[in-house]
Amino acid sequence: MEGREGKSHAPRTLAKPKSQVQDESIMGTNNSSIVSKRSVERLYFSKEPHFFRYFVKKPQRRSPLINRGYWLRMRAIDQVVRRFLQHQPPDRAKVVINLGCGYDPLPWQCFTRYSSACEGVKFIDIDYKELMLKKRDVVTNTAALNSMLTNMQIPLDGDVLLRSDEYLQLGCDLRNLKSLENILASSVNIQESLILLVAEVSITYMDVEAADALIRWTGTLPHAKFCLLEQLLPEGINHPFANTMMAHFDKLQTPLKAVQKYPTATDQCERFKNLGWPIVSVCNLWELWGSSDFASISERKELDKIEPFDEWEEFALFGCHYFLLVADTTPIPSETLGSKSKIQEDQSRASGSSEREIQYRFSYEEYPKAQGCNRFAAALQIRGQNHSRDAIGVFGGMGQSTRINSVDIYSDDEGTSVPLQLSVASSFPSSRMCHTITDIGDECALLVGGRTSPDNALADCWIFHKWLNLWERVDDLPVCLYRHQAVHLGCGHVLVSTGRFSSSGISSAWYIWSRRKGWVRCIYGCSEQPAATYGASLMVTPYDSRADTISRHGVIAGGLSADGLLSQAIWRFEVKNFSSQEPIIAFRATNAKNAAAIARFGASVIHYQDRVYLVGGIVKDQLLSLADETRSLDLEDCTLSSVLPKPRPENPRPLLIGVSVVNTGSSFVIMGGSAVCFSFGTFWNKGCYTVSPLPGDSYLGKPSSATTAPILPWRFIRSVAASPPDETSCGPHPASATDQQPVLISRVQLSSAEQFCQFVRASQPIIFEHSDIGSCTLKWTSEYLKEKVGSDREVIVHEATTMHMSFKAKNFAYTSKTFGDFLNQIDAGEKLYLRSLSSDKPSEIPANIATDFPTIAADFSLPPELRVVTDTLHSSPLRISGPVIMWLHYDVMANILCQVRGSKRLLLFPPSDITHFDFEPGASSSHINVFEKLNDPSLAPTHPHEALLRPGDVLFLPPLWLHTALPTSGASIAVNAFFRNFRASCYALGKDVYGNRDLQAYEKGRQDIAKIIRSFDSLPMDVRGFYLQRLGKEFAQKAL
């Protein structure tokens, strides 16, 4: 009956007694178990003979979690058996009895692995006779199995089904102890032999009285050892994992019986002692995994090389619900299991002794059907449409079937609405999980990294603009990263801890991001520093804008190391000069008495009402209790307070794995959360929880006598999907990229002048669609323009020899043409381009469509929402283009491009990309044709954006964004409007006809640089170079 964890395929008929039906169901569970073990055998034991293969006709590859869990089970049993075989007794025969063995090939594995230790050992497999007859057929018909047996005999009748010198097969019901004792006594000397009895998830299906009788009888054997591997309920049946597990077996009509009477490891220990086994050692499998005796560092690391793995929380849940017990009837050297030799009266709680207890009330709001389901997502605050109250957005994570890039909206007000641009924005982070989103003030939040699969980490980072409800891609991480942590240091600086960059690699660097500097690597300030971990808990002292803004203190605790062990270390740290180009981070180890409860993996950390809270995650060796799952931490002395939940009885217990937690001011909200419960099914939290403290003094379990105000619950409102998902925004742009895909510029409908000002402050390109720019979109045909402007009017146009015009190569000529001829040639497909100039003084006055083309000016107008453009207008040139590409350039002034006729495609790049396009000093244009070279490896590190303009579209172009344009439908007509969005003193003095003269600070800076260089002219070249290089480095450092 070994390890039955799958679906039963045994037929059920009403004519059969209930007991027979259950026995057949129990035998049927063997099928799924051996398929899982065969999956492990193929992956993890490739260098030794495979024996499950003979019992599994159709192998299946199980999930990494099931593979790792069965590997742990198989390794646990193997270690006990190996130590038994290799122990040198005083002239006693050894017998290994597998109780409820199913198709487990334990004897053949031992013959192969421990051949010398198996000399003279007898292996006995026992299970239902019906099942053992099938196993006998496989053995007798498989040379690889029967060739290892000598003197093999097949008795014609009786319960001994196969006999050999090394191996016996017995068909026997373990509930019939008299028959079992007689068969064993007739086969081996059970009184004089050293006997190891193995029961791996088998006798738990028996009635408890029958299983206890079996344990009591085996306890009378003078030289016996019992190895039992079964399930636990360490937190009772109401724990989500336990409930899912028990429901699974109940559905299969194979209920787990022993665990209901003996739910904890302590109960199992006392069980065996009371049934005659004086020496008992027991631990759960998660504790066993963490034992240094169980596996070496190299062995653990090797597992990740075989199969990428990142399901650690679920692996811990599985391990905490299974135990390994080894009992002895004689005082011989006993097994040491886990980190402790045996369970005492009670397992030590992770909490230790709490100094204080805080009573909290929970409110629960159930999700709509099939909504709100995600895990390992990240939350951020967003603004409601009227900006009067906040909502919560939970982005990404693992959904019910795949990773998602939608945003789930939560609110404490059902009327909260989110502007539509959140749903239609095409510039959107791709699907991911295990990322972070860090609030950096009232205006924005920073998304960092994440992953798709454990070996596909991401490096892209995004700013979410809260007032605009729009995403902006910013600097990529220097390295792909997930399972990291991030905190806001203040002044827009975000500290990011170490994390994973692959399934077998952990970063060792700490980084700080800011809008001005991008990513800067921290310098370690002392020789003492923590080992690299991932999934740790990162906490900093609350930011005080009135205090010193160049340093912050914090704590980093727990996390997993490269070998999959949960660190118990707690480190204090100080970040100095975090706003500089060389921030320093210094660590100091601390000995906290509550380290076991603080050092977690995968916990959520929030600051709430002047406290730091650890929510969920996993700890070393054991399962967090309900009282320990959420703890309040004092960062000054690392003392803990228990958060005692006071949920309503009808509210389900949450599973605090993969949840998103947000501080709303009056409460904190727990959203999402889920875990795959091994092979038993997936548990999802079916609602969100609003948590707030009871008023008054509720420490030390003293409930407040104050009147409790009703809690305002948060609830799921709706899910906003990205359309379309931007699958190209994942990870750093590889140097060899050949499929660079631009991010589509978001399209919105402009609703107010205030909203436009917010877009200007965000300094991100945006398209305002369906804009009312007058009757020009209908009237401005070529014939209409010739009639109104005049066919004979002289205009200066660019006449190009190639499609791509280059200002550096000057592959075009400035040509004078009549307006009528120009339009005729444009319509005929000639490579011509008009950028209108002032009709009065073209070399001195900026273009203005109202005065330069008065006969058509009334056809064009800016929407009232753009009045800030009108109020600060610099120029408004008319642009008419044939099939030519305007050179890549930037404009110093902000501008809007209003598409009147035809369609146009623009490529844009943020100002930070300028170093990749060969802009010469002082030049505002590049010779590179990015339409042709976009997939060139040299442009792989850039961040291209794409705008597709149709008549009535208005594109906002922030200052210094590089851009180039190409008509996509014959002739294109547009009107530009340049406007000043900086202070007047920022702009250069004197003429600026085109609106692209660099800012005064840059022009003056270039003059100063020239003076500095000239001051070294009298020095020798080597001395001159020496000092100029030093000045250059100093300038670069101070500039940022």
Image (cartoon, grey):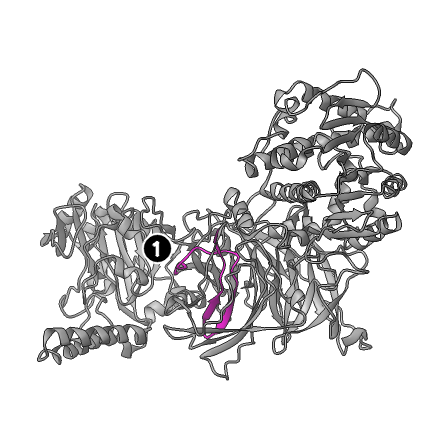
On screen, 92 above or below 233? above
Question: What is the x, y in percent for residue 238?
Answer: 78, 52
Looking at the picture, tell me which residue is in the foreground, 623 or 788.
623
On screen, 452 above or below 52? below
Looking at the picture, tell me which residue is in the foreground, 507 or 819.
507
Determine if residue 414 is in view. no
What residue is at 69 percent from the left and 65 percent from the top?
630
Question: What is the x, y in percent for residue 901?
Answer: 29, 49
The residues colored magenta run 475-502
In this rendering, the count of numbered labels is 1
Q: Quadrant of the N terminus?
A: top right
Question: Where does label 1 land, which residue?
Answer: 943
Question: What is the x, y in percent for residue 70?
Answer: 65, 41
Looking at the picture, tell me which residue is in the foreground, 688 or 57.
57
The image quadrant of residue 216 is top right
Q: Is residue 494 magenta?
A: yes
